[in-house]
Image: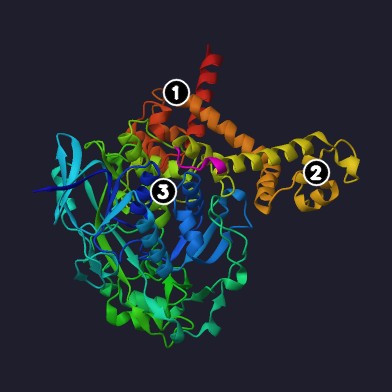
Amino acid sequence: MTINKEFDVAVIGAGHAGLEAAFIASKFNLRVALFNLNKESIANLPCNPSIGGPAKGVVTREIDALGGIQAIAADENKIQIKKLNQSKGPGVWAYRAQIDKETFHDWFIKKIEDDPNIELLLEEVVELLKEGDEVKGLRTVNGIYRCKTLIVTTGTYLKAELYREKKFADSGPDNNPASNFLSDTFRNWGIELLRLKTGTPPRVYLDSIDFSQLEVDDSNDGNISFSFREPKKLPLEEQMHCYLAETTPLTKKFVLHHLEECGTYNGSICGTGPRYCPSIEDKYVKFPNREKHFIFVEPIARNYDYCYLAGLSTSLNKDLQEKLLRTIKGFQNVRIKKHAYAIVYDAINPIQLLKTLECKKVKNLFFAGQINGTSGYEEAAAQGLIAGINASLKVLNREPFILRRDEAYIGVMIDDLTTRGVTEPYRLLTSRAEHRLLLRNDNADERLLGLGRELGTIEESFYRDFLKVQEDINFNIDFLKKNYAATYRLAEGNLTLFSWLARGENSYSELSEILGSKLRSLSVEAQEKLMIKVKYEGYIRAQETRINRLEKWRKLSLLKIKDYSDIQNLSREARERLNSERPITVDDALKISGININDIFWIKAYLDSKNNLNSEEK
């Protein structure tokens, strides 16, 4: 067969991972081929029409700080945005935006068309080509394409099947065609595949809901944006409404009565579903004492007359779904636009990947997104970014790019995936990050812009502007540490302005009014950064100390520990896993699924107590 074209980087799939990979590769001025089955599924939002959330919203900002595109796309197409967890500490603050599904798709199509380095090819890839242990290209129904590196971002399309009570279609999300050939290639190459499941709730017509019975769930801020580089605000008066609905005792009774007509409970679905995004039937089975659950009623697009029901995914058969919905407050007369379904698909176990997301068995072959066993648009985009960066660096014979766990949530996720693998769809959570006070929503630029500049994916002019803001923040902090509150009649004694501001009841705006030109002018965002540095200085320093200690302990031998059951503060799961795996060093222990930094501190304390006891006996 004739070779059609040659590219530096080929990307299969134009979802969140594939788009991120293609656009970042273009920033390295490489020739990029972007393959997709059709134009309609490019930049699709097949499930929740939102971007962000706890941990995930921070990831979107990390992507932006490294030169990626998701944050800009979200800001350009958002129809509502919230700042989450404001009643808690900054380690769990995050943004979440509702996205206009229609304009999001159109915006990305134009971006692809305007990028001279990206060629969009609407062809189905039927085979990957390799010579020895190196991938060399791919074959579509129309011909052969050669490439130096190849990134697979096929999402949930590999041998995808749709289910309600039972299987009703061999297709991908939104009834797009499944990709049925690549799984065979991977199996032939010795790559382990998993069978996973996810689901999506029904979409219902807006005019069939009685919103007077629902609680309004509006935005709380019109002055926030995901992107540091191209921020775009959405005033409150232009934001669309979200609502909260509640299930009733009738909902619970209905679901439990019809479990045998749910694909997940009658044995027809074999894939493993996401733990942190359960179906309505899972909620009632796994949490039998909960009488009600919240349903989030979310807009999909400004021009759409139907909405999305987050929290109500189900594999009930089509005929029962409307009856289920009508047990919910405000939904007594609801009409369904699109029924819920479950989707089962092939994924690879990501433990087969390096931290660059390159396959260990096949050189120059990278994987990113839901094919790696993850769930969520943000996780997918972040992997696409890292795979795109490393595929490009490999073409250019440059050193690989790897983020540590203490540098970014992206580093946490990739470390989890590649050292522990998955048995169910992986979702990024704040609890997965042992250093989450350092991995904050406000400081993604401080953590990662310098790395983006070194890569060449961040504009020099923007980086200079960023450094000027950091200089102003540091100048003001230095001033606050060197001057006393008594000088300005704010307090008596030797209390510094820094310590005065660290008190919970005091604000920076109040202080800046008093000090005037003695402080450099800061934007609202920069003021928030300064306040976090002041109020949480002690906690931040303590976490940095823990990181430094852990790095020193990585090579510490654990061979002296005969039975981890003797370490009382370890969880039962940790004891069982450690006794089973028998790690040689602390570094080995950290690679075991379910073992975290707190476990290591208890192990170290146990070893120290044993050493002290032995010293006393001598």
Q: Which x, y percent locates residue 259? A: 30, 73
**Residue of label 3:** 382
Which segment did they paint magenta? 456-461
What is the quadrant of residue 518 in the picture?
Answer: top right
Q: Is residue 293 visible?
A: no
Q: Is residue 34 left or right of residue 181?
A: right
Which residue is label 1 attached to? 556
Question: Could you tell me the amino acid type at mark 1?
Answer: Leu
Ranked by sequence position, the earlier of labels 2 and 3 is 3
Q: Residue at x 48, y 25 (%)?
A: 553
For mark 2, what is the residue?
A: 500
Viewer-nearest residue: 237 or 203: 237
* Residue 312 image-quadrant placement: bottom left
Three-letter code, disc 3:
Ala
Q: Tag 2: Cα neighbours inside 10 Å, few (<14), some, or many (≥20)?
A: many
Nearer to us in this view, 328 or 161: 161
Which of 456/447 is in front? 456
Q: Determine the CA span between mark 2 and mark 3.
A: 40 Å
Marks 1 and 3, how far apart at CA: 32 Å
Q: Residues within 10 Å of mark 1 (few under 14, many from 20)?
A: some
* Label 1 SS: loop
* Residue at 35% in and 82% down: 322
> Percent position (x, y) of residue 612?
55, 19
Please indicate whether residue 53 sits to the left or right of residue 495 in the image.
left
SS label for mark 3: helix
